[in-house]
Image (cartoon, grey):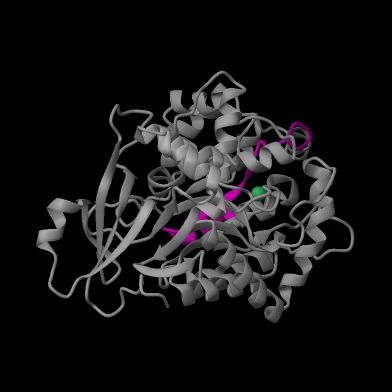
Amino acid sequence: MNSLSTNSANSPVAHCSSIFHLIDDPRLTKDPYVFIDNGMLVVENGIIIAAGERNEIEPTLAVDCKIVEHPNTIITPGFFDLHIHFPQLTTVAFYGEQLLGWLNGIIPEEEIYKNPEIAAERAKIFLKETLRAGTTTMCAYGSWAKESVDALFSEAERLNLRLIAGKVMADRNMPDGISITNPKDDYEHSSELIEKWHGRARLAYAVTPRFAISCTPEDLKVAGNLMKENPGIYMQTHLSENPKEISFTLELFPGRKSYLDVYDHYGLVNERSIFGHCIHLDDDDFKRVSETGAVLCPNPPSNMFLGSGLFKFEKAKEYGIRMGMGTDFGAGNTFSMLQSMENAYKTAQLQGYSLSPFEAFYHATLGGARALSIDNKVGNFEIGKEADFVVLDACCTPFISWRMEHAKTPLEKLFVLMMLGDDRAVKHTYVYGNPVHSRDS
Ligand SMILES: [Zn+2]
């Protein structure tokens, strides 16, 4: 534990740095952010008790308050990755395929996660890497095996992380030779995990049908029933990622007017639903998503890697869609939400829309919290919220340091970090006021 550190001894800790956070949706508001050059963030017992100008807060500090200097840094809320796969650690960077061929190549590796010891070891690696990237809240897919989700929740609980996760449901169309579940097992195993983990510590459960292709109508019915029986849980799945996936889905569910309508038919489109990708939605789909309050989660690194297409950021803005953003690791070739923002900018540029760094950081922080309906707890630095934050190093490489000297406005500084930064820019990650990653130690 370094001297920066812990907030567990009841005395407050004041972190000194530039401070940046969103206070509203930049798609709707002209001045949605706070940027303070000489700022201070004060944390006590894991909770933010002050955030603002250092010269105003410092005279008010308790005598036992520890002051921690973070020179040449910007403190932002911890990142939200709303779509990530735990069991793809060894299949990231799998060469040469688009979505359906890629899945056939990588899914067999998920078998190994039914071994609790291997799953536990890999959960440590996975969460260490996400914290290195500055991600403090995640919506994660496990494998089909309940042991994978047990292992991930156990490690997240040990670190006191905010994690939403679920075991994948898949009872058909899986690659040859790998285990498939059945609707009865999916119901029982998911129920067992919900009972054990949902609402414990900072953890929550998401019913996780892999995607419509891998689920029979009975399995999707089970997913809908689990949501009805367990108010407060989430549902996460994939939607409209790749043209071949879409046409195969519509073959499997004749009579449904769109891919989204397949999920809608089984009661899976509501304000607790998180849909990954959503690249090829039409106006009727956007309208339906908007009226139900469902969440869309673009994953630009994955969409580039698999050649799936370009998420319509401008259309989502037009329809006022609730949304976050993700990496979709391991189809996404990074754990870094900074790199996801970079790819989001390029995705939007290719469609003639300039995604501002404020909008990008919103999707990766406060927007993610709002999408999960936990913005009363996390997502920015309002007093009383939980202190999940990252210390971003504005001098993390010689060139970034030099470039940053020429960045004058908040927009420029954030845009430099978003376009040039990655996990090297994350100097420290704090969860509930405690340091869980320090780059240089
Ligand atoms: Zn995915």
The residue lying at 60 percent from left, 42 percent from top is 299
| Residue 268 in view | no
Give above or below for 251 relative to 82. above
**What segment carries the magenta color?**
223-245
Q: Quadrant of residue 124?
A: bottom right
In the displayed orientation, state which residue is furthest to the left.
60
Image position, residue 83 (x, y; %): 58, 50
Question: Percent position (x, y) of residue 106?
Answer: 80, 55
Is 239 contained in the magenta span? yes
- Furthest residue in direction top, as rendered: 352
Q: Residue at 59% x, 74% y: name it.
A: 150
Note whether residue 94 is visible. yes
How many dots with numbers? 0
415 up-or-down from 119: above or below = above
Residue at 65% x, 31% y is 258
Q: Quadrant of the N terminus?
A: bottom left
Name the spot of residue 249 as percent of width and height, x first. Answer: 74, 38
Q: In the drawing, does residue 201 fall left or right of residue 149?
A: left
In front of the other: 378 or 269: 378
- Left or right of 72? Residue 284 is right
Q: Position of residue 307 (x, y in %)?
A: 74, 35
Q: Nearer the viewer, residue 16 or 284?
A: 16
371 sits to left or right of 258: left
